[in-house]
Amino acid sequence: LQIAPHEMREVHPATLQMIQTYRFVDITGVSFTADNQTGIVLHFRQPKKTRLFLVQSSRPGGNGRSDLVTLMRQHYETLGLELAVRESCSITGWVGERRALGKDLLVCMRWSVTKTTKRHDASVVGQGAGWLGGSTQRSLAVTSQGWLLEMDGGGVVSCRSLQDLHGLVRHAFSDQLTLEFIHGVQRC
């Protein structure tokens, strides 16, 4: 993870290519993992969205997650934002909560999709960790409670409110769709 003046950047450690950016205005808080001294969970403004990272310091003798939060707090202060430190959690507890998302929701419609993502693209993460084009199989589901769920074989991968969906764009001469959400977020 790299800290910039207004965002956090997830960079692949081996290839140094950018995978994802997280704007500070969208990150509302952090939690430390109690069962792993390198674990940190980011909490986002979007309901039900969190991310877990295991952080190593880039400086000798540093504490990765403490260094990260210190830098984040400095930038948050400059931007006039507040970064909340929330209750600690365990990694297995976080994984269990994330996989349980959507279990109690009534699914109205479900369809299979092929998702393209940098997180699985061999040109970004290396040949041993990804595959050509970064495509992966997922399911999308719409619930009666107004959620759009993205799922893999283990359960829910992401959960977004349908109220945040701004548009569906079909690409010319292709069956590819892009989901456009408010705040400029796009997912293919």
Image (cartoon, grey):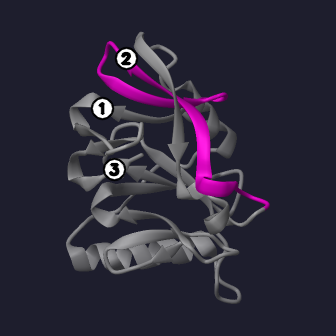
Q: Residues within 10 Å of mark 2 (few under 14, many from 20)?
A: some
Q: Which residue is mark 3?
A: 186
Q: In which quadrant of the rendered view does residue 123 lie?
A: bottom right
Q: Compared to 169, does 138 lie above or below?
A: above
Extent of the magenta region: 128-155
Q: Amino acid at mark 3?
A: Gln
Q: Is residue 110 left or right of residue 35?
A: left
Provide residue 114's location: percent of width, then percent of height: 54, 37
Q: Residues within 10 Å of mark 1 (few under 14, many from 20)?
A: some
Q: Is residue 30 magenta?
A: no
Indicate which disc, 3 or 2, sits on the residue closer to the N terminus.
Answer: 2
The residue located at (50%, 76%) in the rendering is: 2
Q: Which residue is mark 1?
A: 161
Which of 45 and 82 lies nearest the eye of the viewer? 45
The reply to whether the C-beta atoms of the residues labelled 1 and 2 are less than 8 Å apart is no
Indicate which disc, 1 or 2, sits on the residue closer to the N terminus.
Answer: 2
Q: Secondary structure at mark 2?
A: strand
CA gap, disc 3 to disc 2? 20 Å
Q: Nearer the viewer, mark 3 or mark 1?
A: 3
Indicate which disc, 3 or 1, sits on the residue closer to the N terminus.
Answer: 1
Q: Amino acid at mark 1?
A: Ser
Q: Is residue 40 visible?
A: no
The residue located at (21%, 46%) in the rendering is: 182
CA gap, disc 1 to disc 2? 10 Å
Q: Which residue is mark 2?
A: 143
The residue located at (24%, 67%) in the rendering is: 81
Q: Is residue 131 visible?
A: yes
Q: Is residue 153 magenta?
A: yes
Provide residue 170's location: percent of width, then percent of height: 31, 39
Which of 92 and 144 lies nearest the eye of the viewer? 144
Q: Which mark is residue 112?
A: none
Which of 55 and 22 lies nearest the eye of the viewer? 22
